[in-house]
Image (spheres, grey):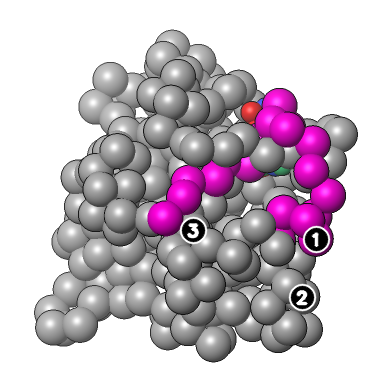
Amino acid sequence: MEKLILVLAESGLETVPKEISHHPAVVSCARRRGKKPTQILLDISLHYHAMKRLPEFQKRGRPDIAHFFLLLALDSPLNRRRLMETVIHTLQDKVIFVDPSTRIPKNYNRFVGLIEQLFEEGRVPPDSETSLLRIEEKSLRDLIEYFNPSRVFLLSERGKGTRLLEFADTIAAEKKPMLLIGGFQRGDFSEETLSLCDEIISLYDESLTSWSTVAIVLTGLSIALRLL
Ligand SMILES: C[S@@+](CC[C@H](N)C(=O)[O-])C[C@H]1O[C@@H](n2cnc3c(N)ncnc32)[C@H](O)[C@@H]1O
């Protein structure tokens, strides 16, 4: 394996959409933070009542998933050895490219501030030539075209049951595998996402969180590659 492309797919990471920017719960949150409602991240634990009228609301408003995911992915031996690229794809078809050297704030509020700045400026830090994080309009299909992976694997509780180390060997044997993990709490991947994958794999017979899944699969792959 030359490089793993690790993607948090369809993640519930977005700023408050205009449709609910006048809802009192959103307005008071934004005022407390000294920002406009559309500049703050949508968060289901803060904006539940406002979000109930949004389409697919159960898949949205979970910045904490991206936070845990990035902390685990960027600290992994695979990333330390520069054997992977980490990318976040959002439900609104934006893509965040993450430089492997990025140090994600461990504090959640600082993470939220960083991602809000990214949505506002398009890159972080905004005025440096080499950005640690940059965001672009891109669908999952565009992302696959951009990286041109040798094979696309999607992890899902509804996939083909496979033992971790067997799956890790399969990934390790690929030149440039892409691995998709869902970045939403409830619901299913879209038909479009499912149609873009070569294999759908389940690693356990119950639903796991995105962050447990990434920890499990990166550990398996590190063992297969003899990094652990
Ligand atoms: C909380 S789940 C999302 C819930 C959703 N019901 C689903 O369709 O997967 C978050 C992500 O973790 C991964 N995941 C969860 N359980 C898994 C399992 N048993 N095997 C493989 N991946 C799993 C999937 O990528 C999933 O999208």
Label 2 crowd (10 A; few <14 / some 14-19 / many >=20): some
- Tag of residue 223: 2
- The numbered mark, 3 or 1, whose residue comes first in the sequence reads 1
The residue shown at (59%, 78%) is 78
Q: Earlier in the sequence, mark 3 or mark 2?
A: 3
Q: Is residue 7 visible?
A: no
What separation in Å lies between label 3 and label 2 (alpha carbons)? Answer: 17 Å
The percent position of residue 39, horizontal first and vertical second, equals 27, 47
The disc labelled 1 sits on which kind of residue?
Leu
**Residue 184, visible in the rendered structure:** yes
Q: Residue at x 78, y 56 (%)?
A: 166
Residue at mark 2: C-beta within 8 A of ligand 1: no
Tell whether 191 sits left or right of 154: left
Q: Nearer the viewer, residue 180 or 210?
A: 180
Q: Secondary structure at mark 1?
A: helix
The residue that disc 3 covers is 177
The verdict on label 1 being within 8 Å of ligand 1 is no
The magenta span reads: 150-168
Ligand 1 appears in which quadrant?
Answer: top right
Compare marks 1 and 2 and give the one earlier in the sequence.
Answer: 1
Q: Are marks 1 and 2 in contact (CB under 8 Å)?
A: yes
Residue at the far front in the pictured view: 173
Q: Is residue 117 above or below residue 190?
A: below
* Residue hosting label 1: 165
